[in-house]
Amino acid sequence: MSDTLPINRRQFLAGAAAGGTALMLAHGAALAATGASKMTAISTSGGAFWPNGARLAISISMQFEAGAQPERGASGPFPPLDPKYADLPMQSWYDYGVKEGIPRLLDLWDRTGVKVTSHMVGLAVDRSPRLAREIVARGHEAAAHGQTWEPQYPMTPEQELAAYSANIASIERATGTRPVGFNAFWLRGTPNTLSILQQLGFLYHIDNVSRDEPFTVAVKGKPFVVVPYTLRNNDIVRFDSPALSNEAYLSDLKAEFDVLYAEAGSRRRMMSISTHDRISGSPARVKALEQFIRYAQSHAGVAFMRKDEIARYALQADKVPAD
């Protein structure tokens, strides 16, 4: 752990207002560097399958999408509306993600000492660059999530390359960091996606739900990491289809943790949780997430890891599956 104390959002904004943005970015970079340095000692001896002898890794995604949704026809909690009409309430629901959701989640991560991966849609970053910069300054990873909400699966290779390049540029402009991880729209890329990502310098993607541990796939003869995503621990799914109460979602997270923690005594296990700005950033859901995090942290050997940390670990660790 860094000896730099966590800062809450009020302190962060006060520092930025006083001209301390560069200091805050340095704070985030130092946290990231500290996390990377912890990856050097890797061993699978004695049942320790994660850095520093950790038993179970938990990785949380914080999707940064609000502001990139289409102006008409976006999905959400309101009844569908003919796209020829402006859906003003739906737009305000998405606005909640950047005005309330992410700020509240950022304070949760600080309170609990957790660092997450934020998959950022380029257009959302362009519309809220200060928020994207704050996410990174507070020690979290900025990963790519496409430039717009346009699905990737029908794209030509040329369109994919242009879209991912634009996404990288948006994140770099706002945060000063280049993403190394990618998440496609609803996980649906193309047969060309991984080779294009590799060409652009990405290390990993998350568009695979087939394992409860990281693994690699061969792309043009080189290993490319898969850090598995989740649907069962995904708020956009669990609060909609089927709809769960906050208490039921918390119960499911604890049950999943219990089984993975038990399995982790003899094999490498990872738990993935996905949060979305406008969904998990509501007050009651933040409360449920905090209760789960505190529950997990009460167990020995639990490490919350950013996905870039997991990907770099997977490239050098022993006994990482290769598909």
Image (cartoon, helix red, strand yellow):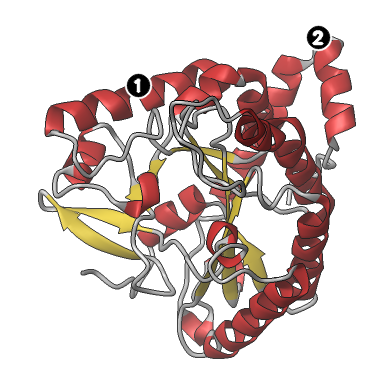
The residue mark sitting in front, 1 or 2, is 1
Instruction: Return the x and y of residue 174 as percentages of the image width and height.
Output: 55, 19
Position of residue 102 relative to residue 273, above or below, is above
Q: Where 142 falls versus 21 (above or below)? A: below
Does label 1 or label 2 sit earlier along the sequence? 2
Say which residue label 1 marks.
166
Quarter that holds the C terminus: bottom left
In this view, which residue lies farthest toward the top?
19
Q: Residue at x 49, y 32 (%)?
A: 69
Q: Amino acid at mark 1?
A: Ala
Residue 171 visible to an observer of this rendering = no
Q: CA distance from mark 1 to mark 2?
A: 29 Å
User: Crowding at label 2, few (<14), some or many (≥20) Cα neighbours within 10 Å?
Assistant: few
Q: Amino acid at mark 2?
A: Gly
Residue situated in front as seen by the camera: 278 or 296: 278
Where in the figure is residue 180, as x and y percent of width and height? 39, 39
What residue is drawn where x is 29% and y is 73%?
Answer: 321
- Residue at image position (37%, 45%) is 185
> Which quadrant of the figure has residue 184?
top left
